[in-house]
Every structure is written in structure tokens, then in C-alpha cells.
Image (spheres, rainbow, N blue to C red):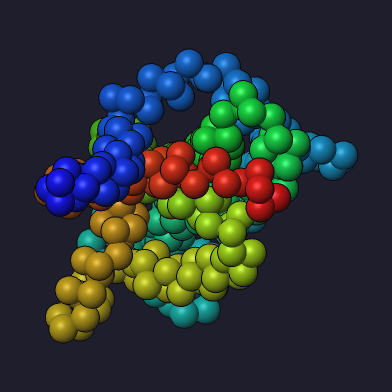
């Protein structure tokens, strides 16, 4: 009798673990998300167009903003601080600005998604009350919008590279591969933050602060080789470090990525995405009660 009771008591916990593992399986949730691809596309387009609604320049801001930022960072770090990037093909000031901008764009793709996530569900109560609406597509629409604007920034980067340095190296064709781990990590973190934002309203301020700290802990304005040897191991704790560095290598420096770090980044990003979806799916049933 005791054994039977123990087995019965253990069954609910085993069921929870089994359900969580099922939702963490990409073979389960990816086909579900694929069925909602048209909805994701519509929500993504709404995110893109909503940013420039009622503005005079409209989509032109997508080109003006990265151009201004590229010029600003080149002036501040190249002219004021007289910095140069080690390992660059030339000692050109413009190439230094392009190198900074490539790393910044990769980081901004991640930061834009995560910063938006905590308020994503609470700002859409009408969707929460609709039982049939797949709430898990909301972070995907933000990711789609971030990829759209990152694509424009990278396009501006290519044009600027062609103008000030010359034809980009063949490694630029590897850019889509470099964005896979960044996008996966951003999506997984967004699912986590979107869920926590429903139950912990202060999480938005925490995420904003964390992104500011992570910004300086990621080698965007400095090369990893510039760090003292004893601090370089700390960068391995930041998954964005390798992602940003590999993006910069293929976009501007014209050298292949470090494939071992890229593969590790893919594993980390994939794990974050799977666990983030499982967590979001487990907690979303309580969203309506809280909101």
C-alpha cells in the first residue's frame, strides 16, 4: 500500500516534468509556431510600421538612424579617443567605425527583443483574454521586427564598407549563420522575460539595468584581445561575446568565424530558446488570472 501511495504521489510531479520536457522539444513547438506563420508575419509588420506611425520621414528613419549612429561612433571613438581596432585590414578611421557598428548591431538585435519582452503580455490584455490566441507568437513578432531593422543596419554597413574601404570579403555571406545563435538566445530570453513580466512588474527595470551592464561586458567597443589575460576567461560567461565577435569578423574584418565558439553559441542559443518556450507555455495559463 505504501509503495502504491508513493507512486501515486510521484505521478503529478512526473507529469509536470514530462509536460515541460515536451514543450522544450523543438520537434513539438516549432511545427506549432510554423502553423501560425501568417499571424506572426502580420504582427511583425505591425511592429515594424507601428514604430514610424505618424512620423514625417516614416521608413526613412530606418536608414537615417543607423547612418547617424555610424558617424557618431566613428567620431567619438576614432577621432576623440583615437582608437584603432587590432587585426583590421587597414588603419583607416572609417574601418574602425564600421567594426564598432557591426558589433553594436548584433548586440542591439538581442537587446531590443529582451527590453520589449517584460511589458509584451501586460500591454496586450485583449490577447490574453482570447483563449484561442497563441500568446507565444508575440515575442516572435518583436524578434521579426528587430531582424528587419538589423537587416537595414547591416545593409547600410555593407554600403559604407564599399564606399570607404572597398568590396567586403566573401565572409559576409556567412552573416545569416552568425545571426542564428543571437536570434535563438533573444527569443528564449524574451519568452522568459515576457512571462516574468506578468507576475513581477519590476522585472522591466531589472532587465533594463541588466542590458546596460551586459552592454559594457560585451566586447563591442573593445577587442577581446585588449583585455588582460586574467579577465578574458570572464568573457566565456557572456554568450553574447562570441556572437558579437563572430559577426564582426565576417562582416568587417574579412576572416572566418571561430567555428568552435559559433557551434557553442548555437547550442547555448538553442537551449535558451527551448527552455524559454517551455517556461512560457507552463506559465501562460495563469496570465489571465493575474492580468
Q: Nearer the viewer, residue 195 or 5?
A: 5
Residue 83, compared with residue 55, is above or below; it is below
**Residue in the image at 69% along x and 29% along y:** 130
**Closer to us: 78 or 47:** 47
Q: Find residue 237 and report its horizontal and vertical position in percent.
A: 25, 67
Query: 117 or 228: nearer the eye?
Result: 117
Give residue 83's quadrant in the image: bottom left
Above or below, comparing residue 198 to residue 220 in the picture: above
Q: Please identify the residue farthest to the front as the structure is shown.
A: 1
Q: Residue at x 43, y 60 (%)?
A: 100
Residue 104 showing in the rendered view:
yes
Q: Is residue 247 visible?
A: no
Q: Residue at x 75, y 36 (%)?
A: 126
Q: What's the residue at 71%, 42% (across, down)?
A: 124
Left or right: residue 186 versus residue 237 is: right
x, y percent for residue 113: 53, 49
Residue 177 horizontal/vertical position (percent): 29, 35
Where does the image place residue 78, in percent across and percent down from the top left? 46, 70
- Total numbered circles: 0
Above or below: residue 231 compared with residue 289: below
Amino acid at each position: 500500500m505504501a509503495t502504491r501511495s508513493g507512486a501515486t504521489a510521484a505521478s503529478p510531479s512526473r507529469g509536470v516534468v514530462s509536460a515541460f520536457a515536451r514543450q522544450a522539444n523543438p520537434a513539438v513547438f516549432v511545427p506549432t509556431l510554423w502553423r501560425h506563420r501568417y499571424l506572426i508575419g502580420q504582427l511583425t509588420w505591425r511592429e515594424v510600421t507601428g514604430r514610424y506611425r505618424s512620423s514625417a520621414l516614416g521608413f526613412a528613419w530606418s536608414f537615417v538612424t543607423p547612418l547617424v549612429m555610424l558617424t557618431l561612433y566613428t567620431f567619438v571613438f576614432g577621432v576623440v579617443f583615437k582608437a584603432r581596432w587590432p587585426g583590421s585590414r587597414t588603419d583607416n578611421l572609417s574601418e574602425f567605425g564600421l567594426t564598432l557598428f557591426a558589433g553594436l548591431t548584433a548586440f542591439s538585435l538581442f537587446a531590443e527583443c529582451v527590453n520589449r519582452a517584460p511589458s509584451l503580455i501586460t500591454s496586450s490584455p485583449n490577447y490574453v483574454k482570447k483563449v484561442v490566441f497563441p500568446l507565444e507568437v508575440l515575442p516572435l513578432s518583436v524578434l521579426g521586427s528587430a531582424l528587419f531593422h538589423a537587416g537595414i543596419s547591416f545593409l547600410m554597413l555593407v554600403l559604407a564598407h564599399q564606399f570607404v574601404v572597398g568590396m567586403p570579403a566573401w565572409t559576409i555571406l556567412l552573416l545569416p549563420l552568425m545571426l542564428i545563435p543571437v536570434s535563438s538566445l533573444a527569443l528564449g530570453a524574451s519568452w522568459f522575460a515576457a512571462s516574468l513580466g506578468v507576475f513581477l512588474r519590476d522585472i522591466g527595470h531589472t532587465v533594463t539595468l541588466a542590458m546596460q551592464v551586459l552592454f559594457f561586458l560585451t566586447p563591442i567597443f573593445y577587442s577581446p584581445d585588449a583585455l588582460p589575460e586574467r579577465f578574458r576567461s570572464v568573457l566565456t560567461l557572456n554568450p553574447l561575446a562570441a556572437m558579437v565577435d563572430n559577426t564582426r569578423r565576417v562582416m568587417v574584418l574579412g576572416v572566418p568565424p571561430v567555428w568552435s565558439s559559433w557551434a557553442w553559441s548555437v547550442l547555448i542559443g538553442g537551449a535558451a530558446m527551448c527552455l524559454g518556450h517551455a517556461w512560457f507555455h507552463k506559465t501562460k495559463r495563469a496570465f489571465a488570472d493575474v492580468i
